[in-house]
Image (tube, rainbow, N blue to C red):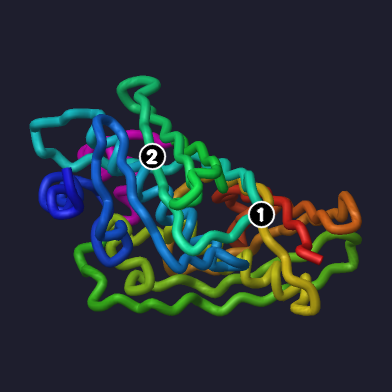
Amino acid sequence: MTTTDIMENIIPYLGESAPYFSIPENSIFRDHKIETEIREWNFENENYSQLIKLLFSLGSLSLYKILNDDSKEKMYFLGEKIRIRKLSYREPKSVTITSESFLESERKGKSHIQITDRHSGDPLFSAELDYYIITREAFELFYKDLFTTVPAEYHDRSFPESKILNTDTPHHFTIATDPFTPNQCKGHFENHPIVPFVFITHCILKEIFSFLGNEISYEIESFEGYASNALPTGITFLTEVFHQRYLKNLFYFKCEIRDTSGNPYGVIIFSIKSKK
């Protein structure tokens, strides 16, 4: 199955669509695995969120394929958690990404993803993604309070403004992120405008790398994300950030995402290493 086959036979039956959902042109299925190549990639700093988005997209595709659902009904794959580990500090010009999915139950699935150097085959990243698998009827019931009959008019590629609010508590600060609009989230569950987890991650990473400064280059060594609730558009998010220096060149960050009323939406935990 080629990219064209995927676009025609799988993507129309996923809860997500373009422009949010996108895959590289040279993606193909090999048995129960999906494989793709990317070149001239850049996942540094807040661009790391683009890696997360790509991995979730590939995981959703391979899960739908393994379901072998001939009914052509829409299925919704909601990310529960993600874990990414950096295995090498090499920076090749092109990489191969392979995703293989498994069903843990009728309504839960897991994807294992490997990123390797396209030329040498050396491993660069490994990732595990856990999903809830939800039918269209169940999704519409769960998120009926977010339903709207007004579709997003256009795709706004911008992100809302964020800023760091300093506190007097050591190793702690808050990131305030302005509300997302439905247009910024177009393609992510149409008629149920929900902020993609990777979008709020992008805003958080942007502020954290700003906090670290640009005198030294940094890279993310490990990343974990846990979603607990759907993030609505139209509200301000406050992310409580707890940080610690473990070694001279290794930093730990735990980010708890909430709204102004204290409702929790998820947690991201990652370590950053300086290149110096």
Q: Residue at x 28, y 62 (%)?
A: 187
Q: Nearer the viewer, mark 1 or mark 2?
A: 1
Question: Residue 47 placed where, x, y %?
Answer: 53, 67
Q: Which three-letter amino acid code belongs to the residue tagged 1?
A: Tyr
Image position of 237 with respect to 258: above or below: below
Q: Residue at x 45, y 54 (%)?
A: 95
The magenta stretch spans which residues? 131-147
For label 1, the crowd category at 10 Å Cα-Cα, with few meaning under 14, some 14 to 19 and many 20 or more, is few
Q: Earlier in the sequence, mark 1 or mark 2?
A: 1
Return the residue nearer the eye: 183 or 121.
121
Which residue is situated farthest in the top direction here? Answer: 105
Question: Residue 214 placed where, x, y %?
Answer: 75, 78
Q: Which residue is mark 2?
A: 99
Question: Residue 39 placed where, x, y %?
Answer: 41, 64
Label 2 sits on a secondary structure element that is: strand
Return the residue nearer the eye: 126 or 197.
126
**Residue 226 in view here:** no
Image position of 119 with respect to 31: above or below: below
Q: Which residue is mark 1?
A: 89
Image position of 82 with respect to 203: above or below: above
Name the quarter where the C terminus is drawn: bottom right
Q: Image quarter for residue 207?
A: bottom right
The answer to whether residue 77 is left or right of residue 73 is right
Which residue is situated farthest in the front direction here? Answer: 120
Question: Residue 129 placed where, x, y %?
Answer: 47, 38
- Rounded to the nearest angstrom, the CA distance separating label 1 from label 2 is 21 Å
Q: Which three-letter amino acid code belongs to the residue tagged 2?
A: Ser
Label 1 sits on a secondary structure element that is: loop
Q: Residue at x 54, y 74 (%)?
A: 178
